[in-house]
Amino acid sequence: MLVLAVVALLALVAQIALGAWVSANYAVLACPDFPLCQGELWPTMDFAHGFTVWRALGRTDAGTMIALPALVAIHWTHRMTAIGVFTIIAWLAALLHAQAQFASLARVLALSLLVQIATGLSNVVLQWPLVLAVMHSGGAAVLLALLVMIIYRLTGAARDAIPARLRGMGT
């Protein structure tokens, strides 16, 4: 379970970075509909220009604004990655919930995950009101803190499972 928690943390950090990339490149409203984007399941996207790192944010190398297909690629990647991150964290929450000592923490994790998904979806549907955008960013921070706490607790639980007489053998 510790490995899954670390994978969840790394996946969340990547998702947070993608969210920052969405925001920094003004790609927030590139997909104004849900569950489709630009009215399509798989919209026209330009990943090469969307994920060029060494350029002015929101602009091409030539200094013009990034074209819509590049913005769609950025936004759509954040959406699709969210599905994977959701799955990993939900799986971790389910496994934690099965253990009595982690059940309440698992419920908080699951609730935070649902709030995060709800704020993300409502940001798209409601055209990104500032209060929801802030809640979505704050929700990511809460999930990050919870995963760090879970990893800490899991390592403590793993350490406590080792009999005291064996803990001192390596010193």
Image (cartoon, rainbow, N blue to C red):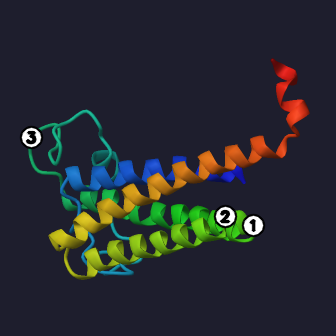
**Residue pictured at 63% horizontal, 52% vertical:** 5
Report which quarter residue 45 is drawn in: bottom left
Residue at mark 1 to residue at mark 3: CA–CA distance: 54 Å
Tag 2–tag 1 contact (CB < 8 Å) = yes
Residue 143 visible at all: yes
Q: Nearer the viewer, residue 135 or 11?
A: 135
Residue at mark 2 to residue at mark 1: CA–CA distance: 6 Å
The residue that label 3 is drawn on is: 63
Question: Quadrant of the image for the N terminus?
Answer: bottom right
The residue that label 2 is drawn on is: 102
Image x and y of residue 17, in percent: 37, 48
Image x and y of residue 163, in percent: 88, 40
Mark positioned earlier in the residue sequence (2 or 3): 3
The residue that label 1 is drawn on is: 99
Q: Is residue 151 left or right of residue 171?
A: left
**Residue pictured at 48% horizontal, 69% vertical:** 113
For the residue marked with disc 1, what is the amino acid?
Gln
* Callout 2 secondary element: helix
